Image (spheres, rainbow, N blue to C red):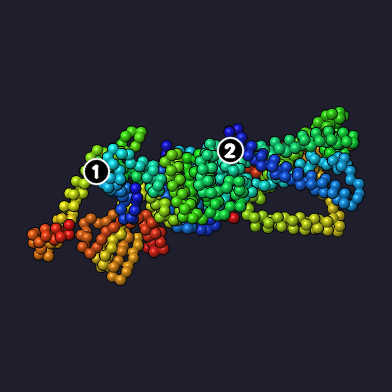
């Protein structure tokens, strides 16, 4: 069981390079976060993994077999995308039936339960739904489809706070009950951060962080204190961002600190959360260098 | 149980801390079952692996016990052990600090005892 | 065929049937109900029997199914969302349309026999292009009929395959591009006809004998049997070759299907 192995994926549209050289592995039974700003290449990557578009180079393998044009492999993947591929004239119930027909074993009871919770009338046509309810409908399918790997691209688009809360609950609950693998692609990190076990951070078509959340955060520090001392203490370290207020500076460091250096009394070392780390890794200043 | 997550400490440590606190305040009595990993994951959207990591810290400390197929239970004497540990910390952290501060302010032992009596 | 492929065939067939029924309903409304109401209003006589007798169900279905075979992208979207490969989509689509067009021709033939003959007793040969051209070849009318039916069914297969090919080519383009291509084709067609007619008027028109020979060969014309009707084997062979060609090309085209930004 190797799960999904993405190898050396490259993709350009017209002349713009979207994905430069993507390598990653998705192991079964985890919740992954694919984090990146808008336009970083998240959706393109997910579309390539699920065979919706083609990469220029590279391969996607599931348990040792290529995913490309492979019904059996594709039947284990489900991508809930921002783009709506369901036909507008279909009733929601019919779309459940189609999912059942083509994926098999659709969990109708759970779908009905979720529809009640989200107050979604299943006798409506897909085209009549608002953006938020289209998202809800697609989330319901994602949670009830028997695919082993579920990819959620911007899963809370258009949802209000209550519905987002409801979704995160059900996501974790569904994950515990079914052991499915979820890959959540989003630029809204705060709410989902604690649910993730492993993160990929993508910037400009490249994976810049790939690791378990705990391990990644272990190396993410906020060094704060007077400008001069902080500059001295962080010199040569991987500083990914800074904030200054008057004479006080906070420097975000991603990577090992230098244990040889003595920490001045005036300087404090704190940990960063995922949101902060992400913002600093992917902001415009980080892109310079 | 309530979780007030702050951002600067790893989540699994916070999970452990919150449960420890709940045992200390006798929210969970000895021999009682505590919420399952699943329940905590679900209610607070925390990855189950993270919750489990936090719980395992408590198991290692002997504060909770796993009963196969049923769930996690507060161990016998867990509350007392927490109290002991916190008393130890209280001395190390608070009393030692208090005395050193008092010395800096040239407060004598007798005066300090008087002050404590006044505040008690 | 795998279970999945069968399910896709079922899915597509159901969709086509629904669309077919929808179109037929409108045709019924436009072709029978509407004239009936009109004649009622104007006070003229309306002959229902005549109307039913005049329905050419077979060719009608032939055209409608061809048109339905043109639609590709919406099916592709829902299938790729449900983890179906392009190859499986192609296979299922070909199977579904072969089945439906074959079935429709059988129904068309039965309709001709049952309804038209019970209502009027006139023969159907004069409506069949195949009988007109190749009917003279056969001495036995039963054989001629049988061949004619086979031809109807086979040609509907090939027509569907051809429409699948055309539809799949169009699906490669965005809506805007499709509109432009459509316009360009119509312009080319009109201008082409005009210049050809113009050339014919001015210089007369001769087709190279090589072209005529090829056309004769394809049509099954042979000087030795001239007058007795053309050789009917040739159109069958033509159709089969053209059908296989269309099928293979449509697979090649569909392999390039991808989800577009629109």
Secondary structure of the residue carrying numbered label 2 = helix
In the visual, does C64 lie left or right of C137? left
* Location of residue C68 in the rendering, given as x and y in whole percent from the top left corner: 70, 45
The C terminus of chain B: image quadrant: bottom left
Please indicate, yes or no, whether residue B75 appears anywhere in the rendered image: yes
Whether residue A79 is visible? no
Task: Say which mark, if any, is on residue C59.
Answer: none
The residue lying at 32 percent from left, 69 percent from top is A245
Q: Chain of mark 2?
A: A
Q: Is residue C140 left or right of residue A224?
A: right
- How many labels were placed on the picture? 2
Residue A116, position in %: x, y?
53, 46
Image height check: is B120 above or below C143?
Answer: below
Disc on res. B79: 1
Decide which of C88, B64 is in the foreground and name it.
Answer: B64
Tell me residue C260's x, y (percent): 58, 52
Q: Report the mark closest to the observer, 2 or 1.
A: 1
Q: Is residue B62 shown above or below A191?
A: above
Chain under numbered label 1: B
User: In front here: C186 or B93?
Assistant: B93
Residue with the mark numbered 2:
A101
Q: Which of these two is toward me, B23 or C235?
A: B23
**Residue shown at 79%/41% (left/top)?**
C59
Q: Is label 1 in a helix, a strand or a loop?
A: helix
Which residue appears at 18% of the width and 49% of the height? B87
User: For the view shown, which residue lies furthest in the bottom direction?
Assistant: A246
Q: Are marks 2 and 1 on the same chain?
A: no
State the image coordinates of residue A289 (x, y, percent, origin top left): 37, 63
Above or below, A54 against C141 in this view is: below
Q: Is residue A14 left or right of residue C29?
A: left
């Amino acid at each position: 069981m190797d799960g999904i192995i993405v190898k050396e994926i490259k993709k350009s549209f017209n002349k713009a390079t979207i994905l430069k050289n993507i390598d990653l592995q998705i192991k079964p039974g985890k919740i992954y976060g694919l984090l990146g700003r808008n336009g970083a290449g998240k959706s393109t990557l997910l579309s390539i993994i699920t065979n919706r578009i083609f990469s220029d180079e590279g391969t996607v393998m599931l348990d040792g077999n290529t995913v490309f044009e492979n019904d059996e492999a594709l039947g284990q993947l489900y991508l809930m995308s921002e783009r709506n591929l369901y036909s507008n004239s279909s009733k929601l119930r019919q779309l459940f039936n189609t999912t059942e027909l083509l994926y098999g074993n659709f969990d109708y009871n759970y779908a009905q339960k979720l529809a009640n919770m989200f107050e979604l009338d299943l006798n409506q046509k897909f085209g009549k739904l608002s953006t938020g309810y289209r998202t809800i409908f697609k989330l319901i399918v994602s949670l009830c489809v028997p695919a082993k790997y579920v990819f959620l691209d911007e899963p809370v688009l258009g949802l209000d706070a209550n519905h987002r809360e409801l979704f995160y609950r059900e996501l974790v609950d569904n994950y515990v009950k079914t052991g499915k693998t979820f890959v959540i692609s989003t630029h809204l990190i705060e709410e989902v951060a604690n649910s993730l076990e492993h993160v990929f951070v993508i910037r400009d078509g490249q994976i810049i962080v790939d690791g378990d959340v705990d391990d990644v955060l272990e190396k993410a520090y906020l060094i704060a204190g007077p400008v001069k001392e902080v500059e001295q203490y962080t010199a040569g370290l991987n500083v990914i961002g800074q904030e200054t207020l008057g004479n006080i500076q906070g420097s975000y460091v991603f990577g090992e600190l230098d244990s040889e250096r003595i920490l001045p009394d005036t300087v404090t070392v704190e940990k960063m959360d995922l949101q902060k780390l992400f913002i600093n890794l992917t902001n415009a200043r980080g892109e310079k260098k | 149980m309530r979780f007030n997550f702050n951002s600067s400490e790893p989540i699994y440590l916070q999970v452990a801390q919150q449960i420890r606190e709940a045992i200390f305040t006798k929210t969970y009595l000895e021999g009682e079952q505590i919420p399952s990993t699943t329940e905590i994951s679900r209610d607070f959207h925390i990855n189950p692996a993270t919750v489990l990591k936090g719980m395992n810290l408590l198991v290692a400390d002997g504060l909770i016990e796993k009963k196969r197929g049923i769930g996690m239970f507060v161990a016998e004497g867990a509350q007392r052990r927490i109290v002991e540990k916190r008393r130890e910390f209280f001395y190390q952290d608070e009393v030692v600090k208090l005395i050193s501060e008092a010395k800096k302010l040239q407060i004598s032992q007798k005066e300090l005892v008087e002050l404590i009596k006044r505040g008690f | 065929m795998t279970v999945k492929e069968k399910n896709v065939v079922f899915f597509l067939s159901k969709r086509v049937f629904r669309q077919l029924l929808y179109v037929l309903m409108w045709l019924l409304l436009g072709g029978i109900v509407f004239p009936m109401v009109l004649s009622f209003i104007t006070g003229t006589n309306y002959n229902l029997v005549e109307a039913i007798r005049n329905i050419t169900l077979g060719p009608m279905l032939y055209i409608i199914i061809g048109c339905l075979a043109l639609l590709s992208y919406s099916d592709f979207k829902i299938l790729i969302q449900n983890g179906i490969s392009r190859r499986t989509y192609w296979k299922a689509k070909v199977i579904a349309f072969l089945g439906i067009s074959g079935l429709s021709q059988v129904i068309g033939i039965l309709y001709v026999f049952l309804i038209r003959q019970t209502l009027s007793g006139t023969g159907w040969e004069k409506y069949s292009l195949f009988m007109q051209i190749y009917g003279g070849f056969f001495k036995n009318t039963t054989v001629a009929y049988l061949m004619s039916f086979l031809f109807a069914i086979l040609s509907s297969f090939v027509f569907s395959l051809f429409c699948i090919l055309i539809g799949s080519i169009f699906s490669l383009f965005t809506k805007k591009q499709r509109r432009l291509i459509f316009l360009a084709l119509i312009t080319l067609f009109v201008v082409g006809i005009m210049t050809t007619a113009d050339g014919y008027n001015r210089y007369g028109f001769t087709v190279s004998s090589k072209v005529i020979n090829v056309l004769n060969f394809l049509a099954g014309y042979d000087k030795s049997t001239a007058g007795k009707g053309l050789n009917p084997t040739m159109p069958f062979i033509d159709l089969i070759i053209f059908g296989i060609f269309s099928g293979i090309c449509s697979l090649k085209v569909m392999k390039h299907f991808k989800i577009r930004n629109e």
